[in-house]
Amino acid sequence: MGVESIRRTSPVGRFLPEAPLEHLVERFWTISWDLKDQPPQTGETLPHPSVYLVVEAGRSGLAGVNTKRFVRTLEGRGRVYGVKFHPGCFRPVWTASVRTLTDRVLALEAAFGPEGGALEAAVLRCGDDAVAAVSILEAFLLARLPPWDAKAQLAKSLVARILEDRTLTQAEAVAREAGLSLRSLQRLFSEYVGVSPKWVIQRYRLHDAMERLEGLEGPQPVDLPGLALSLGFFDQAHFSRVFKAFLGRTPSGYGRPREG
């Protein structure tokens, strides 16, 4: 099935990038809502270690990694188009430390100059035509396609390893696997990912905790000390503090936020 066919039949509004952008872009996406004559709806998203380019009327921007949970209230009608970059892979496009974007959202014109403003206008003119909007976003990025960056790909692969290997609960273990010193790993993540390896580990291990807590049936007692230690936390208190900082609630009072 060709790319155009995939896009036209995608039930979730997620589109794969063309081959030249595969090493930079994880996916293009779109979300729409129509809450006319309905009360506003608030949703939560557990943050990913990714940079996003977002186009939405009145809210477009280039968003760095959000280190806290993302909360958004939707009302009326609207549509968002976005680009999710692979962790570590926006650095060659940005040509500066991605840490400068962490917990920030820049207007597209501030991030890319007048061409950023033109991009916003062109995408918004597409309305509900996702194929046309994604094509414009692709063309914008292809015009800025940077040279191959081995460090970006290393950062991307290490974030993927942390996601996949649940035994990686300490930054020192990641550094050993990568053949790097801990300090070199920390510098790589700061510059290319925008957050520390410790933050990435905790983010994904907290997702593991969410899955385990969800798997409990009925009012079963939760072995929080054992869960905390298995996920690489010092103790239950440390685990509870980090869990609440990410999710806004304690493990015992957890109700899962929506993944983004």
Image: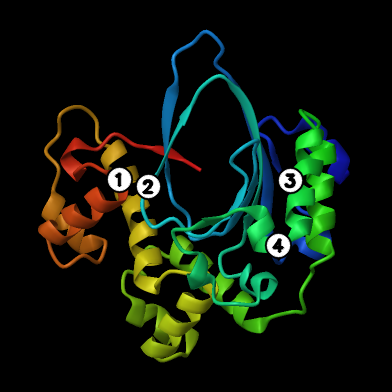
Q: Secondary structure at mark 4?
A: helix
Badge nearest the viewer, 1 or 3: 3
Kindly check if marks 1 and 2 are in contact, taking CB atoms under 8 A apart as contact. yes
Seen from this angle, which residue lies furthest top? 37
Task: Please give the name of the residue rendered at 41% of the width and 28% of the height, measured from the top-left corner.
Answer: 42
The answer to whether residue 220 is seen in the rendering is: yes
Residue 18 seen anywhere in this rendered image of the structure: no
Decide: few, some or many residues near mark 2? Use Cα within 10 Å; few <14, some 14-19, many ≥20: some
Residue at mark 3: 120
Q: Secondary structure at mark 1?
A: helix
Q: Nearer the viewer, residue 171 or 173?
A: 171
The label shown at residue 73 is none
Label 1 sits on residue: 247
Instruction: Residue 157: give x, y in percent of width and height.
Output: 57, 72
Please tell me whether mark 4 or mark 1 is closer to you in this view: 4
**Dot 2 corresponds to which residue?**
69
For disc 4, the neighbor class at 10 Å (few under 14, some 14 to 19, many from 20) is some
Q: Is residue 158 above or below residue 166?
A: below
Residue identified by numbered label 4: 112
Q: Residues within 10 Å of mark 3 (few under 14, many from 20)?
A: many
- Distance between the Cα atoms at labels 1 and 3? 32 Å
Quadrant position of residue 109: bottom right
- Looking at marks 2 and 3 on the same chain, the residue that comes earlier in the sequence is marked by 2
User: What amino acid type should be assigned to the residue bearing mark 4?
Assistant: Phe
From the viewer's perspective, is residue 120 above or below residue 129? below
Q: Is residue 26 above or below residue 200?
A: above
Whether residues under marks 4 and 2 lie with C-beta atoms below 8 angstroms apart, the answer is no
Q: Quadrant of the N terminus?
A: top right
